[in-house]
Amino acid sequence: EYIVYVTADGDNFGMMKSSASTVTHYLSIVTTLTDMIYFPLLYSLKKIAEQKTGLKFVPCYIGGDDVLIIIPTKHLKEFLIHMESAIRNMLAYEAQEGDADLRKLRKGFLYKRLGVSAGLYLTKDVKYPVFLATENARALEGISKKYAKSSIKEREKLEQEGDLTPHFTFTIADEKTFSFASGAKDDYRLTLNGSELVELKNYMDKLLASKLTANKSRKYFQLNKSRREYELTISYHVARNDYDLNAVLKLIEKGRKTKIDTFLLYYLLYLAEG
């Protein structure tokens, strides 16, 4: 069974704590930031357990804003989407509630920089050293943090429009794609936010329904090919084997627009399904 090591850490939590002007304000901040980690985790796992007959996961470490858990890869898509929903909506809702300190905090400039960055490392062999898998997940988490910081200018533009949404950013890889995700190529990435995944999942589900499994898709491309050659190879095989060509063309279009490697992402997210 494929499993995924998930590490996560809050972004700019320390900066937010240092902005407190009173003890009450500081405690309000700490409570809010703690909830921002624990609630999405609990919400995601609870939602998956409700949809499935059961859920196996290992909470290796959950302390403060620092997290390490292990879950089956077959639950990963739902886990990420539920995390996205909880992080984006929980504090936006709470911004209308609570005491004056909390409302002030969530309307402040620093609030716009809040978020959660995660690293996801997939492995099939349960004998793979936990230490190495954790280190790889942490490295991917670091990539997520860098990407989140680089997009802060765009978030500051949204601030002018009254945006109250914190981000959830993650980077995903396995042993075959780890060097790629770590920056072997700069033009396309395996780092994205939860809302981008929600948009892409519809086309990926259509690909799976047309019998283009993740394992089949992997043999159609090589990481050392140019992007155009890579896209032509996939399109050719999809048309030849009567897979969902429209879904493939949409993923190519989305990949060019967002610079996300949508086909490697499909391979990683749907690997547990064949």
Image (cartoon, grey):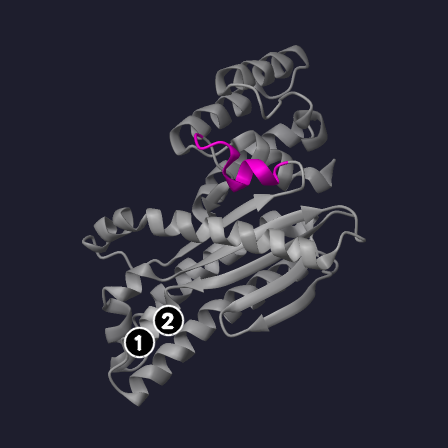
Mark 1 highlights which residue?
18
Horizontal side, residue 270 vs residue 203: left or right: right
Amino acid carrying mark 2 in the image: Gly
Residue lying farthest bottom?
23
Which picture quadrant has residue 135?
Answer: bottom right
Label 1: how many Cα within 10 Å (few below 14, some 14–19, many 20+): few
The numbered disc on residue 78 is none
Check residue 179 for magenta coloring: yes
Residue under the image location 51 percent in, 18 percent down = 226
Q: Is residue 138 visible?
A: yes
Give coordinates of residue 107: x percent, y percent.
24, 68
> Magenta region's main secondary structure?
helix
- How far across and down, in percent of the image, does residue 17 sit? 34, 76
Bounds of the magenta span?
A: 177-187
Q: Tell me the residue at 29%/71% (across/down).
A: 96
Residue 180 colored magenta? yes
Q: Report whether residue 81 is seen.
A: no
| Residue shown at the point (74%, 35%) measured from the top left | 274
- Disc 2 is placed on an element classified as helix
Q: CA distance from mark 2 to mark 1?
A: 6 Å
Amino acid type indicated by mark 1: Ser
Q: Report which residue position mark 2 lands on.
A: 14
**Picture coordinates of residue 231 (x, y %)?**
53, 18
Farthest left residue in view: 160
